[in-house]
Amino acid sequence: MRKELREQISRKLMGHPVSQETRLKLQLAAKKQWLNTDISEKLQKANIGRIPWNKGRTDLPPSGMAGRTHTIETRLKMSKSMKGRIPWTKGKTKENNNVIRKMAEDRMGEKHWNWKGGITARTRDLEKREWRIWRKQVFERDNYTCQKCNTVGWELHPHHIQNYSQYPELRYVVDNGVTLCKDCHYDFHSLFGQINNCLNQIKLFIYRKTITI
Ligand SMILES: [Zn+2]
Ligand SMILES: [Zn+2]
């Protein structure tokens, strides 16, 4: 290459340094490529023909949010505005408050997000074994590293991109799992709730390094 040309190029590069943020984005994009490849297609296919979990349900509370979702900014604002407030549940228990009791009952059994179905001990053992294998595969693929904060090897959880209870056919699909540390896993579910979780939420959660709650 001619000397002048080389100098010209290096001047150009110096004039437009790749920002820290861009570099981080590029790194993340390379690292999390599996999140962008065919997995969304695969997951979408698995979704075809599925009946939404709330279809025809009349026991659900009426919600002004029905059919709409908050943007992540709104969610963050909401969760920030909750800080420092005394929770309305303070001092109330299942024993002394009807609303709390009703809420606890609603989360029991099949209404619980982690409901594993009314299964026998033997099936449960088999499922547990399968789950352990799946968990190991997810952790290994992610190098035992939290995909949100890069914590390595400390209290890791395998998160199901599409819920365990709602998508039995995706329970042990490695692409449907993400390694998160305990804290990030907790943050994820506080932000996005415990049901109807999806790939977009995980993408938002992982790529938006600035999420604080
Ligand atoms: Zn999870
Ligand atoms: Zn983490």
Image (cartoon, rainbow, N blue to C red):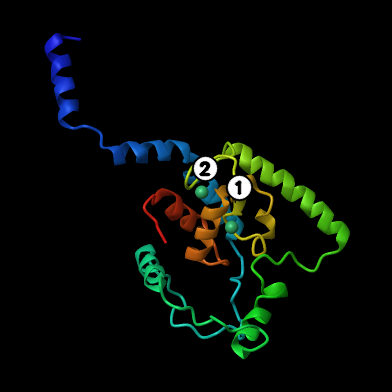
Q: Earlier in the sequence, mark 1 or mark 2?
A: 2
Identified by mark 2, the residue type is Thr
Q: Position of residue 25 (x, y in %)?
A: 36, 41
Q: CA distance from mark 1 to mark 2?
A: 9 Å
Residue at the far front in the pictured view: 91
Residue 37 as seen in the image, left or right of residue 48: left
Q: Report helix, strand or loop for mark 2.
A: loop
At a point 56% along the width and 49% down the height, the residue shown is: 181
At a point 40% along the width and 36% down the height, the residue shown is: 27
At a point 76% along the width and 48% down the height, the residue shown is: 130
Residue that numbered label 2 is attached to: 151
Identified by mark 1, the residue type is Leu
> Image quadrant for the N terminus?
top left
Quadrant assignment, res 61? bottom right
Locate ligand 1 by image quadrant. Answer: bottom right
Q: Is residue 36 above or below residue 3?
A: below
Q: Is residue 139 above or below residue 99?
A: above
Residues at marks 1 and 2 touching, judged by CB atoms closer than 8 Å: yes
Q: Position of residue 88 (x, y in %)?
A: 50, 82
Disc number placed over residue 73 in the picture, else none: none
Q: Nearer the viewer, residue 45 or 71?
A: 71
